[in-house]
Image (tube, rainbow, N blue to C red):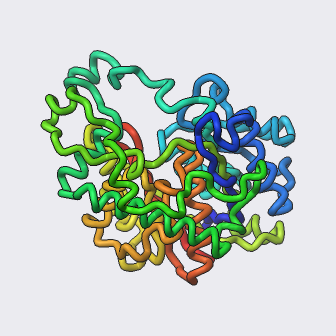
Amino acid sequence: MRDAVIVDAVRTPVAKGKPNGAYHGIHPVDLHAHVLRALAERTGLDPAEVDDVIGGTVTAIGEQSTNATRLAVLTAGFPEAVPGTTVDRQCGSSQQAISFAAQGVVAGAYEIVIASGAESMSRVPIGSARQEAFVGGPGLENRYPGGLIPQGVAAELIARKWGFSRAELDEFAAHSHAKAAGAWRQGFFDGQITRVTDLRTDESIRPGTSVQALSGLRTAFEDQRWDLRFGLIDWKITAGNSSPVNDGAAAVLITTSETAARHGWRPRARIHTATAVGDDPIMMLTGIIPATAKVLARAGLSVGDIDAFEVNEAFAPVVLAWQAETGADPAKVNVDGGALAIGHPLGASGARLATTLLSVLERTGGRYGLQVMCEAGGTANATVIERL
């Protein structure tokens, strides 16, 4: 019976997704190509053996349009015979790429495949491909009067439903920065990284941030439209307890155990189970709760069997609500910090989480890891990996 294993994974340091960010001068296709080359170099992979490259990119317009993954394959110097395709499951795009890659390997469609992702939010700003009113068309408007909403407003609705205070959100954010800064100091990220420029650490991390400093930030999404529609009056989401905008890329090499043995590769983990779910597109970011339940049920595991969790920190209340509903041990969640500190380069984040999760399992001796990603439109991806 065929399996799908991860041979290696690599990511760039995550840069600020602004004109003063470290990667603003780099074309997103070149950024993506960099991790493809790095992955091949780290593993001794002959790119001619790659059956496909499946890459995630969220804002597929401008420099990130026209199947940017195929362009990255060519830019990386891979043979022209190597195909590439770009997928969009919003923030979970490269996590979905990993799932598609694993499915293709298990099915026999692939022997060797790269799942990757890249996003340059400094050059292709978030929301630039989105309709202003968040409405897909008359049919969607009929089902959801007023249309869908910004993710920040969904985060506000989550904070209200679960009763989180502003102080709790800011405390979670400050802790994320402290964990990420500590992980860099202790060298925990070093083995994951391929450097593109002289940027040596994740650029958005603020080692000295505090709850007091975060409490002074103004709310980011307060708007009378949402007051009227949802009765939101106690606004809590700020730039400090939301993930920043970022540039970055990551890539994962996936094959079978048999193929890995033929190449002399020692797999780092097995992709045990993967799933995706749909959920309420207004609350939007709570899909990670049913996604976790579904992937654990399919895997035949309980939350207590999981040794490390990577839960994308799109907004602080998303992870806190997930913890409250799943009962996961907070000490096992995002142990090296999360997206609030490290950053969230949309299309790359799923592969970045996988890269970090592998490292955490190896460092701690854990067996099972679970990563889960909330996504715009009310979907979520969840993946269980088993360290080998």
Q: Is residue 371 left or right of residue 117?
A: left
Quarter holding the N terminus is bottom right
Q: Which image quarter holds the C terminus?
A: bottom right
User: Is 191 situated above or below 373?
Assistant: below
Query: Toward which corner of the image does residue 325 lie, by quadrant?
Result: bottom left
| Residue at the (66%, 51%) spot, across then down | 250
Q: Measured from the top left, where is residue 364 in percent x and y?
A: 56, 82
Q: Is residue 226 left or right of residue 150?
A: left
Q: Is residue 53 visible?
A: yes
Residue 76 lies, in percent from the top left, at 82, 42
Task: Tell me residue 355's x, y (percent).
Answer: 62, 62
Q: As rendered, which of 159 and 53 lies closer to the eye? A: 159
Residue 275 visible in image: no
Q: Residue at x 53, y 80 (%)?
A: 366
321 in relation to 158, above or below: below
Report the front residue among 192 and 292.
Answer: 192
Judge whether 211 appears above or below 119 on screen.
below
Relative to 1, say whether 362 is above or below: below
Instruction: Report which quarter residue 13 is drawn in.
Output: bottom right
Q: Is residue 111 left or right of residue 341?
A: right
Number of marks in the image?
A: 0
Q: Residue at x 71, y 44 (%)?
A: 52
- Return the residue nearer the eye: 228 or 74: 228
Residue 19 screen position, x and y as percent: 63, 34
Residue lying at the far bottom in this picture: please name it. 365
For the point 28% across and 16% down, the residue is 138
